[in-house]
Image (cartoon, helix red, strand yellow):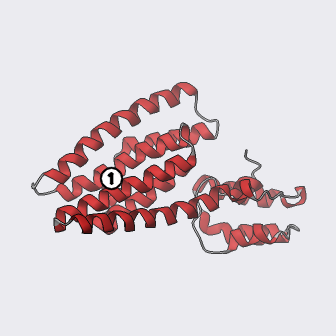
Amino acid sequence: MLGQAVLASTEDFAADLLGVPGAGYFDERCQAVLDLAERYADKLATEQDLQAAHAVAARENASANELLELAFTSGAPGWVQMAAQAATAVTAAAAHAAATEVNAADAAVAAAAFIGDIAGAWAAKETESAVAAREAFVMAERKEWGEQCDLFRDLFWSSFCPVGLAAVGRTLAVVALARTIYEERAFERLPILGDALEDAGIGEAVILAHCREPGVHVRGCWVVDLVLDKE
């Protein structure tokens, strides 16, 4: 779940910093790895499937690192596009590891540091200034940390402040809506879910607020998982 969100933030980063749409250069094999990791988390894929995905992720990670090094040392046309491709591919591999082997905090640290490194390398190439490179690294890393914190609040808030959901709240309509949000990633419907929960008799302010307040929502959103009774 976290992997897809990390990928999205990295594609945004590539678009903002490099001036190209990250998604346009993203390797479909990395996306397949992330999709498999999600299916495994939902118990829809086997351990053997996961091991095969690990092999793909390792190959993509190695080739993307080579491409990234080439991109920042080459003066050939198109190096910016290569950097965008490398950024998204490397992060996808890291995101897969985050979704399967590495704990979420370590994954967030790795993602922020990686994005900081890319920003610093870009600034160094553009300005030939070590000071500018360091400032770019710090700013990019801090920005990514903020985005990672938003993700953590969406995914893990209830782990630190446990909230229960009364059985009365799991009506057929509420559960069906939550399942649609989860399966279709239709998080713009969360305010509707909040209304449905309230209509069903759920009055916990923190649940309703999470549904209605603006913010980042991804698969693994603690309210959606709560309604669907996911572990």
Q: Is residue 98 above or below residue 81?
A: above
Residue at (88, 58) in percent of width and height? 166
Q: Amino acid at mark 1?
A: Ala
Q: Where is residue 1? Give x, y as percent.
A: 57, 49
Q: Is residue 6 above or below residue 53?
A: below
Q: Where is residue 213? Give x, y as percent.
A: 66, 75
Task: Answer left or right for 42 relative to 147.
Answer: right
Q: Which quadrant would the C terminus be assigned to in this image?
A: top right
Q: Is residue 110 above or below residue 221?
A: above
Residue at (18, 61) in percent of width and height? 125
- Residue for badge 1: 87
Within 10 angstroms of label 1, few (less than 14), some, or many (20 or more) residues?
A: many
> Looking at the rendering, which quadrant does residue 45 occupy?
top right
Residue at (33, 61) in percent of width and height? 14
Q: Where is residue 216? Give x, y as percent.
A: 57, 66
Q: Nearer the viewer, residue 93 or 194?
A: 93
